[in-house]
Image (spheres, helix red, strand yellow):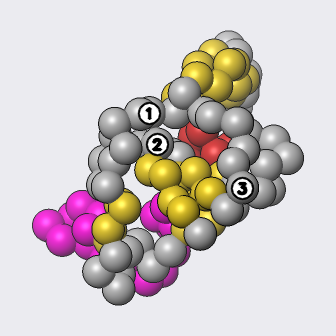
Amino acid sequence: MKYINLTPHDIRLNDGTVFKASGKIARVSTTYSEFDQNKISKIVFGEIEGLPESEENTIFIVSGLVAQAVKNRTDIVSPATGHPNVVRKNGFIYSVPGFVRNF
């Protein structure tokens, strides 16, 4: 399986595997509703830019926000930054145990 990292940062797994940033970045535009009486706003995703069409035997690594906006694609993953086995150094994420799919 080939992985293409469409985030601006290298992604390091806990086992030492590093997925270098490809130099291409997938982004999604967002807009927000007004806050309601409970101080809650709704996020609305717009167009996704920089996300290639599906390719056989290829997984695309994107940010969690982009992954939330993508529908019906099993080739899209994001780093498992909320997983309990995330490794932090100086308060910042150093590595993740793997990836997650939002679909």
Residue that badge 3 annotates:
56
Q: Quadrant of the N terminus?
A: bottom right
> Of the residues shown, which amino acid type is indicated by label 2?
Leu
**Crowdedness of circle 1 by 10 Å Cα count: few (<14), some, many (20+)?**
some
Whichever of labels 2 and 3 marks the residue nearer the N terminus, that label is 2
**Crowdedness of circle 3 by 10 Å Cα count: few (<14), some, many (20+)?**
few
Q: Quadrant of residue 58?
A: bottom right
Taking 97 as reference, is 57 left or right?
A: right
Which secondary structure lies at badge 3?
Answer: loop
Q: CA distance from mark 1 to mark 2?
A: 5 Å
Marks 1 and 2 in Cβ contact (< 8 Å): yes
Q: Which residues are magenta?
A: 79-94
Would you place residue 55 above or below residue 85 in this image?
above
**Crowdedness of circle 2 by 10 Å Cα count: few (<14), some, many (20+)?**
many
Residue 19 in view in this figure: yes
Which secondary structure lies at badge 1?
Answer: loop
